Image: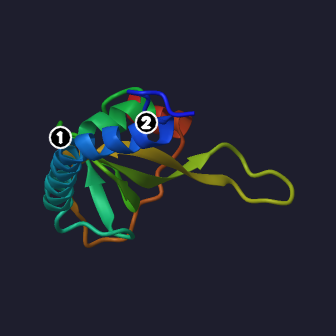
């Protein structure tokens, strides 16, 4: 039975997709262009850094880690360092070597913590090996008394 003006659903769907194809192609092209621009920006952002590098971190990371700004005898901020473990977009995962509590039977002391850090909080790549930082109690005892 043939009904005048009736278009089967499958044929109607194909016609609609064919009509929308140029618009979708333009959208896909803009998405590809913006992804390329973002990838280029991120590669320039992390230029000179690679995983495994020892990096010097800004004073904000010391304050976040210990809860206070650490300074040396001349009043300059003490900058922590860590190992760049992974780059994730505009952020990086940094492993800071740090004692965490006492040793327990069967294992040594827990050492290290991971930070998710913005590129702006990383100052530069260091040529020295990473430092093993003390826990908060020992640092406060040294600096407060």
x, y percent for residue 61: 33, 38
x, y percent for residue 123: 19, 52
Q: How many marks?
A: 2
x, y percent for residue 32: 21, 54
Front residue of 135/140: it is 135
Q: Can residue 17 be spotted in the picture?
A: yes
Density class for disc 1 (Cα within 10 Å; few <14, some 14-19, many ≥20) is: few
x, y percent for residue 30: 15, 47
Q: Which mark is residue 76?
A: 1
| Residue at position x 49%, y 33% in the image | 141
For this view, does 11 lie left or right of residue 102?
left
As displayed, is residue 113 above or below residue 87? above
As displayed, is residue 110 above or below residue 64? below
| Residue at position x 37%, y 68% in the image | 51
As displayed, is residue 92 above or below residue 83? above
Front residue of 131/19: it is 19
Give the CA separation, mark 2 to mark 1: 18 Å
Front residue of 104/20: it is 20
Are the residues at dot 2 and dot 1 in contact (C-beta closer than 8 Å)? no
Circle 2 residue: 65
Query: On the rendered image, what quadrant is the C terminus found in?
Result: top left
Circle nearer the viewer, 2 or 1: 2
Q: Can residue 58 be spotted in the picture?
A: no
| Residue at position x 57%, y 33% in the image | 1
Q: Which element type, helix, strand or loop, lies under badge 2?
A: helix
Q: Which element type, helix, strand or loop, lies under badge 1?
A: loop
Q: Earlier in the sequence, mark 2 or mark 1?
A: 2
**Quarter occupied by residue 36:** bottom left
For this view, does 11 lie left or right of residue 135?
left
Front residue of 30/16: it is 16
């Amino acid at each position: 039975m043939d009904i005048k003006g009736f278009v089967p659903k499958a044929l109607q769907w194909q016609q609609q997709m064919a009509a929308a194809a140029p618009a979708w192609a333009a959208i896909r092209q803009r998405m590809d262009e913006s992804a390329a621009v973002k990838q280029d920006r991120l590669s320039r952002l992390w230029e000179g850094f690679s995983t495994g590098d020892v990096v010097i971190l800004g004073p904000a990371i010391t304050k976040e880690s210990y809860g206070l700004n650490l300074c040396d005898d001349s009043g300059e901020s003490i900058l922590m360092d860590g190992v760049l473990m992974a780059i994730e977009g505009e952020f990086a995962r940094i492993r800071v070597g740090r004692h965490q509590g006492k040793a327990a039977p069967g294992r040594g002391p827990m050492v290290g913590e991971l930070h998710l850090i913005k590129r702006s909080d990383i100052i530069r790549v260091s040529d020295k090996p990473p430092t093993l930082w003390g826990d908060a109690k020992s640092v406060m005892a040294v600096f407060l008394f």
